[in-house]
Amino acid sequence: MKTGVYIGRFQPFHEGHKRCVEHILKTNDRCIIFVRDTEKTEKNPLELSKRLAMIRSALNGDERVMVQTLPDPSAELSVYIGRDVGYELIQLDTETEAISATDLRRKLYSDAGKAFDPSAPKRVR
């Protein structure tokens, strides 16, 4: 069984992440998503349980997708690839590549009445 692996914080899980999973499933039988279990900070505002629920909801319970947690309390995970043995960088369309989780977090803070960067885009996907 051919398996694709996808690692991230998913703060929050957004359309760009979903499209990456869809891309992985086009060439693999399944996708294992490793969600980094990070401490809650301004950069990581969403608890692990909320992120897991977002992922499962966005993927509509697709049985080809497994979601696992990866302990990363300091949020300083480095991912290394030994050599070119079939790993690929997912490159999607320009619109999807432009989706920014940082901008999404700024929008979440703004909607909650908290301080945010005024230069953040008003329209966030």
Image (cartoon, grey):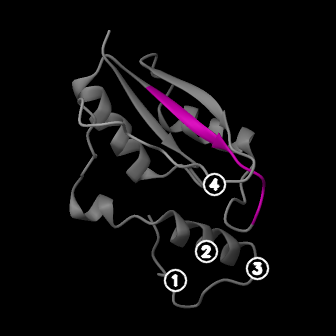
The count of marks equals 4
Mark pair 2, 1: CA separation: 7 Å
Name which residue lies at 43% across and 47% down: 17
Pointer 2: what residue?
Answer: 106
Comes first in the chain, label 4 or label 3: 4
Main SS of the magenta part reads: strand
Number of other residues with Cα within 10 Å of mark 3, as a class: few under 14, some 14 to 19, many 20 or more:
few
Name which residue lies at 28% across and 46% down: 89
Q: Amino acid at mark 1?
A: Ala
Question: Element at badge 4?
Answer: loop
Pointer 1: what residue?
Answer: 120
Pointer 4: what residue?
Answer: 76
Does residue 37 belong to the magenta stretch?
yes
Picture quadrant of residue 105: bottom right
Does residue 3 belong to the magenta stretch?
no
Q: Position of residue 46 (x, y in %)?
A: 71, 53
Name which residue lies at 32% across and 35% down: 22
The vertical placement of 58 against 123, above or below, is above
Mark pair 1, 4: CA separation: 25 Å
Which of the two discs, 1 and 3, sits closer to the camera? 1
Determine whether, in the image, residue 71 is placed left or right of residue 118: right
Residues rendered magenta in the picture: 32-41
Q: Amino acid at mark 2?
A: Arg
Q: Quadrant of the C terminus?
A: bottom left
Determine whether, in the image, residue 74 is placed left or right of residue 92: right
Q: Amino acid at mark 3?
A: Gly
Pointer 3: what residue?
Answer: 113
